[in-house]
Amino acid sequence: MDRLIILCCLALSLQHGWALQCYSCISDNDALNCGDPFKKIYTPTCSLDTGIVCMKTIETNGDGGKIVARSCVTTAAGDPCSMFINEQSQNTKVEHCSTCNDADYCNSDTAACCEDCGADLLTAASVTAPDAKFVDEPIILTDESLQLADSRQYDDSNGLPILQVSDAKFFCKNNHLCSIDSNVVETDKDLFMAGTISAVEDTTVKLENSSAGIVCQKSSTINEWFVSGYGTAHVNLWVVSEFGTYKIVSVAKEYVPFFTSVLNICHYANHLIKSMIESSDASLDEILSDFSTSNNPLLTIPTLEELVENAQFIHAHVTAYFLEPYADGTNDAHLLSLPFYREFCDLANLDLRKKAKGRKVHVKKSKVAVPSITKATTTPIVNEAFSLVFDEHMKIVGDSINHGNASSDDFEQKISTFEEIPDIGRNYIAGTSIGTFNSTLDYIKKIGIIQSSNSIIVEPGTFLRFSCSRKLVVKGRKLETPYFGQVQYLAKARDGAGHEGHCHVRLFMQSHETILETVADRREVFGSTSCLDIPFQDIQCTLPILHWLEYEKDAVPHQFYYKMRHDLDSGAFISLPNLKDVAERQGFKIKCECCETIEKERLKHLVRPIPGPIKSFQYLDDVYCCNSFVLIPGLDEEIPKAPAKKTIKLDPSIYMEAFRKEKTRPPEVYYHPLDVCQIVSVDTEWNSQTLFDPYHVDLKVRLFRRAAQTKLQDTEKMSHHLLFYTDKVFKIKAKDVLGVAYVAHKNFIKAKLEDWLESGEKRFYFRSSYDKDTLSNNLPFLAKQCQGAVNPKTGMGMAPPDHVKPSRRLKCLDVFAGCGGLSAGLHAGGLTDSRWACEVDKDAAEAFKKNFPEAVVFNQDINSWLEDILSGKEENILNQRYPKVGEVEMIVGGPPCQGFSSMNRYHTGIAARFKNSLVATFFSIIEHYKPRYFLFENVKNFAISNQGLYLKTVIGCCLKLDYQLRYSVLQAGNFGAPQSRYRTIIIGARRGENLPQLPKVQYTLDLPAYTLALNGRQIADGTTYGLLGEETYKSAPFRAVNVYDAIGDLPDIPCGVTDLQPKYLPCCSSFQYNMRLKSKELKDHITRNLSALDKARIKFIPLEGDWRDMPNSRVQLEDGTTTAPLKYITKDGKRGVCPCNFVSKEERKNVACIKRDERKSIVPWCLPHTADRHAHWAGLYGRVRLGGQFQTTVTIPEPMGKQGKVLHSTYDRCLSVRELARSQSIPDHFELSGSMEDRYRQVGNAVPPLLAASIARMFQT
């Protein structure tokens, strides 16, 4: 038979003048010229178990494709199989189907395929034809056991009896077993059922479960199949014949392979549906993680790619379910726009705006039980502040408040409406002099301005509206007219007329001129940091503006008040005293705070010589002398060039997606840390009483090179604290000095090196010299005497200052505590003593307790916890005592961020809004306990989402609570964490407490500085090194901590194994030393398991690569299966995997996507399918860069997730729990709890402790 078919093909070839060539059915498309096919036929052994070669020869002409010959050849195991192709004519090709694990499928009209179900005629599994005992379905349904069953039910939609079938199997009219999802029913072809029919019982679907009943050998035609139970714990599949509606309880053993896949996909769809109902704010990665916790024995755990592969089926069922109307005509279509589902549809290139295409899908459902959302518990002031944002999700507990019985919305008073005193006929009556202001002016207590019946008294603390011929500007921003301000003091010309003098006024702003805009109380005005002199003649009128403390005592409707000044540049609101009280205490001779601040800044930026035997000076609040070390901007000739990227030319026929990398390559950004130099001499002569402009002071300095400035090997693995002595001496100006550095020879460091480096700021060490590309240990005697700092009085070396030790730690309450990353950082910074914590997640609460055993950890919902406290309860049901008012000195926390996070691109769901409203709960706790300080932390998007609405609301709330605050967006990598993750930080201090500054950055990142921009006002965030008001630099004292610094000592481990005890590799960085300091063994170094396909894919990804580096080739996987190359279409010089890749976005909706090849491929089909409209999916399946930083820290590391690169730099696996903990700067001794997924989540939700420690130290300075 084989020979006959070959001869037939040959005869056709000779008729058309073809020259023949042989192919193996499993070849890699390497042509082997056979010459004479009768004599030289290439006959390799066919490795397929089926021994089938499906072959079709197609001749293409101008009229289109014409099938010339098609055949399927059956061979015995080991016999040869042959394929033919015309090599000379480009219009002819031979294709063969998936039976040979290559090329195309056979068409359904092929003689070798069933015309009904498409099954291969030679390999199709069949059912036995009905025997003599066959009974028609209608007769079976009349059996007494079915007719008289107590559970007898009828389908309301068709009136048919509802029954169940076990040991079921489904087949076409040719008796071939086929899946109910094989499109037979949908194409109006006959599908039949066989099985055991019985009355409906309360049982869930099983694969194999024979039960008592009546055997049906062949039912009537199946007209419909549908799914019920979506949105519940169990999914059931049903079929409808001409005579009954059947619930599939179990299937026959031989039918299991046909049924398992469709049942699992239905479970996948149900899992998504339940998640959309119950966890609408979850991320797609979290949904995938939840599959592993499913208790359904039928559910195999899918990968993201497997979900995408079945996206058409899943989407059809999900949309059918949520679009299915209830009895009242409503549906749940709004749930289709939830975050993770839209992300899933993006990956699968599905349009949510359209109903799923394809077969008609039938589902049955009951009303969706959307879980009720407990309202956020809030206190009165907080409720008022947040009511516009989260009104539907909050309830008040406590007494209401009263501000003059007038809300901000009712307030119509304006500064411009106060009546002005006419200029004509004014009389000025100046008070007596109370002191000398300068050579021509005297202080006066007050001045009276009288005009007919109008008169006013102006004195320190009085608010004025005044005229000004020029535009007034505060920090580069024009103030609105009319101008107004508060009198700081008055001065009158000595022996002059009454009007010859001026008021010195601090400028004020109305609330809408601040960052708050309309969120603020319109009755509140804010002081600025600018002031000016106003001649008496320019005074228009006084304004009845009260200080907050007066306003609280006697609130008057439509009354203005003040309590804070707003620093637009630094993002701070700082309390102002009642100036009238201050003036009385100081005899009305008070100094202007604005002037003092400006003068202090001016003196700070001048060089002040210090008297003594050693030539020393003070500049920028630091003292310098000979042998002191300074930080200066990087010298151009010393800045190392960014390492050249090695490009390897890849074969485009194998690496089909490599071309995309050039389209997404970001511009190179490389910032060198500040240079460290030692002052050799001060070359400017001076008188100790003279202040010098730093531009006129000459210094001679010696450069100390960093490792990156040398030509040594592996410099990226050397400590960022290491320097090299050089002979390079040059001159600079004092204005080039940015700060002091502390450098010691290693021999003078008595403590352990790493401990000494971490004991204070800006510390470096050296042990050798580097000049002319030569490394030497021969150092001058004086160089060996460097001890870190220099005594400016004696010029002798001394130890550098350590971090300030706190006199007493603050008793701290951590809410939304997680595993305790924020508390750990604050404790390490010496600020807090963690006494209490509240965390709803059981595993995270358990981890917090392990790390802070002395703390009382409340494993409660935060709203019920707060409601208990506000209602007067002293302890919970576990007899844990609640903290009392006055005990808590600091409250810290970061409410859940899913509603704000850009990782969760669509965050408008009900649950997301509720989690956002937990911000109100946080500040209600502040209102109740009134701590001295609070620290609020969240993702960057909290500050910018909804045009800054959440940030503005929080600021407005803090002002109502009478808290000073400072807000900013900080980059964790700037403070020692090996990541590039931004965090919104708000620090609050109760009135009367000092409001700390934000920390100055210490580590240089190769990222542009981020600036918070709201309402056109940019708030500097500290990502530059320097002081506000002066030139700032993108560089900092140290280079960034990179991936190698963080995890270079952690060994490779197998995927999915949790019971190993791996050992540390040798420590190779100070960061690793600090992480391992209190840990004796390596814990939590475990990583998630991967499928055989993902493991193979990862092996192909090179250093710093991603999915675009995968080859499009055939690979045998570790489970024995083999991948197939992804098939591409070429059109007009372009290449794609689907016709939609060749049309514009507007035309795409008119192009039907082809069904993807069902076989596994190394290159995931869904990625090139949608890459052009998703920035080429850069970073998916990406490896972290050894010399770079972790982009972020995810809660679930999914290779195809969009949160960032999660594959190890060199090992073929995902990052482990411990490695992601290192990316967060969480030390190794820090305890985690729960399953692997729980630990991943705890790490991903934590605040980097190094960032928290940097903030903590600012409280002590």
Image (cartoon, grey):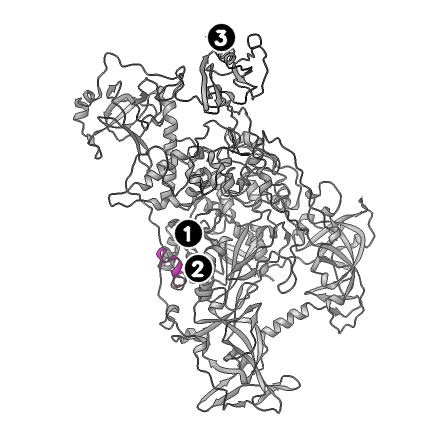
Q: Secondary structure at mark 2?
A: helix
Q: Secondary structure at mark 3?
A: helix
Vertical arrangement, residue 314 with respect to residue 514, above or below: above
Q: Which of the two marks, 1 or 3, is nearer to us in this view?
A: 3
Q: Which residue is mark 2?
A: 923
| Residue contact between numbered discs 3 and 2, judged by CB atoms under 8 Å | no
Name the residue nearer the viewer: 415 or 799.
415
Q: In the image, which disc is placed on residue 110?
A: none
| Residues at marks 1 and 3, CA–CA distance in whole angstroms | 72 Å
Mark 3 Cα within 10 Å, few/some/many (few <14, many 20+)? few
User: Which circle's residue, 1 or 3, is located before the other in the chain?
Assistant: 3
User: Which amino acid, by three-letter code, is at mark 3?
Assistant: Arg
Q: Is residue 269 visible?
A: yes
User: Which amino acid, by three-letter code, is at mark 2?
Assistant: Phe
Mark 1 Cα within 10 Å, few/some/many (few <14, many 20+)? many
* Residue 884 occupies quadrant: bottom left
Q: In the image, which disc is placed on residue 915?
A: 1
| Residues at marks 2 and 1, CA–CA distance in whole angstroms | 14 Å
- Percent position of residue 24, x then y: 54, 16
Name the residue nearer the viewer: 1146 or 886.
1146
User: Which amino acid, by three-letter code, is at mark 1?
Assistant: Lys
Q: Main secondary structure of the magenta part?
A: helix
Q: Secondary structure at mark 1?
A: helix
- Percent position of residue 443, x then y: 59, 85
Name the residue nearer the viewer: 52 or 1001.
52
Q: Which residue is mark 3?
A: 3
- Percent position of residue 1223, x then y: 57, 45
- Quadrant containing the C terminus is bottom right
**Residues rendered magenta in the picture:** 381-397
